[in-house]
Image (cartoon, helix red, strand yellow):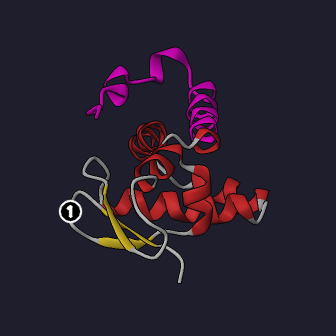
Amino acid sequence: MSKVVRLRSSNNEVFEAAECMIAMSKTIQTMLNRFQDDQVVILPLEQVDSKTLAMVREWCENHVTKSTLKQYQFVEGLDIDVLLHLLITANYLDIKELGNHMREAIAERAQRKALEEIDPRSFHTAVF
């Protein structure tokens, strides 16, 4: 039996961690180092809500399958607040590729607007 990894969100919802998520997240890898292989591990991610955690898992799964179309569609319908939460979560979980993708998506959104259209209040968000 190998290690079974579950993630508990800030609102106490428990998710099975996808292998790709574990492989991409330096934070999760560091947390797992203190457990033995034949354990069921529940890692508390107190700064990440269940909605955002589910989206991170989905993004990681799309990234592993190298589906550029799915990754593009993933961010296309999201508003700036969700993109910012995903960026903050990517930083917290230390998932470099996700962070880069969110920065690119946010920059692309900003480029589509005139300076007067950008609301600076959109960029004020809680930081972990």
Question: Which residue corresponds to the image point at 56% horizontal and 38% vertical from the top-left?
Answer: 99
Position of 14 compared to 30: left or right?
left
Q: Main secondary structure of the magenta part?
A: helix
In which image quadrant can residue 67 be found?
bottom right
For disc 1, the neighbor class at 10 Å (few under 14, some 14 to 19, many from 20) is: few
Identify the element where label 1 is drawn.
loop
Task: Give the mark count.
Answer: 1
Tell me if residue 13 comes above or below residue 103 in the rendering.
below
| Residue farthest left in this picture | 11
- The picture places residue 74, in percent across and down from the top left corner, at 60, 58
In which image quadrant can residue 66 be found?
bottom right
Q: Name the residue under label 1.
A: 11
Between residues 111 and 43, which one lies in front from this camera angle? 43
Does residue 67 belong to the magenta stretch? no
Q: Is residue 59 visible?
A: no
Tell me if residue 125 comes above or below residue 39 in the rendering.
above
| Residue farthest bottom in this picture | 1
- The picture places residue 82, in percent across and down from the top left corner, at 41, 47
Does residue 125 belong to the magenta stretch? yes
Question: Which residue corresponds to the image point at 55% horizontal and 65% vertical from the top-left?
Answer: 58
Tell me if residue 99 comes above or below residue 62 in the rendering.
above
Please name the amino acid that badge 1 sits on: Asn
Between residues 68 and 46, which one lies in front from this camera angle? 46
Position of 120 compared to 112: left or right?
left
- The picture places residue 97, in percent across and down from the top left corner, at 65, 42
Between residues 29 and 118, which one lies in front from this camera angle? 29
Question: Which residue corresponds to the image point at 50% horizontal and 57% vertical from the top-left?
Answer: 56
Magenta residues span 99-128
Question: Which residue corresponds to the image point at 60% horizontal and 28% vertical from the top-left?
Answer: 107
In what quadrant of the picture does the C terminus appear? top left
- The picture places residue 48, in percent across and down from the top left corner, at 32, 51
Q: Is residue 98 visible?
A: yes
